[in-house]
Image: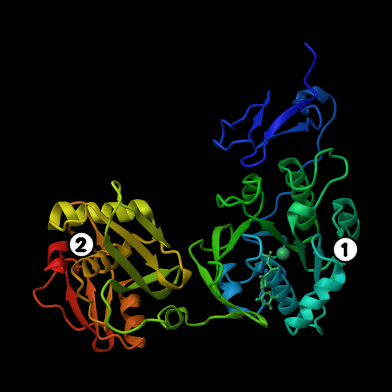
Amino acid sequence: MAKPKSQFVCQSCGSVHAKWQGRCDGCGEWNTLAEEEIAQAAPGGLSAKRGKRGRGLEFVDLAGQADREPRRVSGIAEFDRVCGGGLVEASAVLVGGDPGIGKSTLALQAAAALSMREGTSCAYISGEEAIDQVRLRARRLGLANSQVQLAAATNVRDIAAALDSADAPDVVVVDSIQTMYVDNLESAPGTVGQVRAASQELIRLAKARGFTLLLVGHVTKEGLIAGPKVLEHMVDTVLYFEGERGHQFRILRAVKNRYGATDEIGVFEMTDGGLVEVANPSALFLAERNGQVSGASVFAGMEGTRPVLVEIQALVSASPLATPRRAVVGWDGNRLSMVLAVLEARCGLLLAGKDIYLNVAGGLRVGEPAADLAVAAALVSAAYDRPVPEDTVIFGEIGLSGEIRAVGQSEQRLKEAAKLGFERAWTPPRRGGKAKAPPGPDGLGLEELSHLEELVA
Ligand code: TYD
Ligand code: MG
């Protein structure tokens, strides 16, 4: 039988199909299959080239010392922390995010900051904007005098020719990977095949020449890096740049990091002069709180190593619909359903027939189960129209029987709350629980709740 010349590759998840079909079996997306040429026959096993011997490997001691400081620190603290303490030499970092969220701005600012450091040279290769446009942006950002080397290119062969030398720059930004193409592939730029081939080539160069590669990539609505989820496996670090349109906050989040923790976030504010670091996000997220209103509570959360206080807002209203609405922004919808079910089943709160809206103010996305209690407090407060005391922070996880469970790092959460002037905290009981809770750090009054009913009461 003749070998097929082409295959159908899903542009969303990268799975390969022999025939065209409307829906990808891999990820369930519709109309994402595109025909691509099969690049080459797969190489045979080692035995196919009998008689040819590989070069022997040279093993070295694991305990050996690296010659130089392997991290390149930009001085933008929010960026460095998310990278795990600076960019690692000879590594590839993917910065993903929605179009227009500020990826190019971040990449340019980071490159400029890095090039200020002694002995660090940076190149910025733009496939989306012309050189003059990048210059214009740099002038707006106040970076007109930085030492970053600019180029506009989309052909990976040209880029490779420029970078494949011993004096390649230390940091190379490629904006964006979707505009890059490898000229011996037939498919259009932005397809899975092209993105994969282009990144493979660039990453190989980064490893060989020891520069840090910063790839910018667009994301589809589903939250995947457009097309190539595959790209996530190829790079060392994946950072997502996210935020609500219309909000000025932007959050840089590490979702994969071979050289650091993945739960770190960096908070920025988008201003006329570019991205500005937000060193104290809690103050920012709580800045628009307007006093004692029902349906709001303050959650003392942790984002990575840093405590972050956010306001959680709930609205409960009678629903005209047969199936009431449940809308959540910034939290997990399934978790909301669970908290509602526990409130109904264990505390007798009647919420059926009510529309329920939940919002994490400021555009932050909270992923911690520790927010359960704060969410429940906001819901109960909205349902009874009774405000939660203004000077109180809340955290704790809720179990299915309504019990409130301990969460990690409570000391740090309480310290942050005290720093911001809160006076009381509703917390889970400590292990071994004594009758009366001692005051928390800085005289914070602790009220330990062991069951959700105590909250409702
Ligand atoms: P950009 O970095 O081009 O986004 P991306 O590369 O992710 O597509 O950012 C574009 C948005 O940022 C645009 O809506 C305008 C806004 N912006 C500012 O508000 N201030 C600035 O100084 C800059 C450069 C951009
Ligand atoms: Mg851009």
Give the left or right position of residue 329, taking residue 55 as reference: left
Q: Quadrant of residue 397?
A: bottom left
Is residue 27 depicted above or below 404 in this figure? above
The residue that label 2 is drawn on is 404
Badge 2 residue CB within 8 Å of ligand 1: no
Is the residue 185 above or below the residue 7 in the image? below
Q: Quadrant of ligand 1?
A: bottom right
- On the image, the x and y values in percent for residue 98 come to 62, 60
Q: Amino acid at mark 2?
A: Ile
Q: Residue at x 28, y 71 (%)?
A: 295
Q: Where is residue 133, by image quadrant?
A: bottom right
Which numbered disc covers residue 202? none
Amino acid under label 1? Ala
Q: How is the image coloured?
A: rainbow
Q: Residues within 10 Å of mark 1 (few under 14, many from 20)?
A: few
Q: Earlier in the sequence, mark 1 or mark 2?
A: 1
- Residue at screen point 32% across, 85% down: 418
Which dot marks residue 166? Answer: 1
Q: Nearer the viewer, mark 1 or mark 2?
A: 2
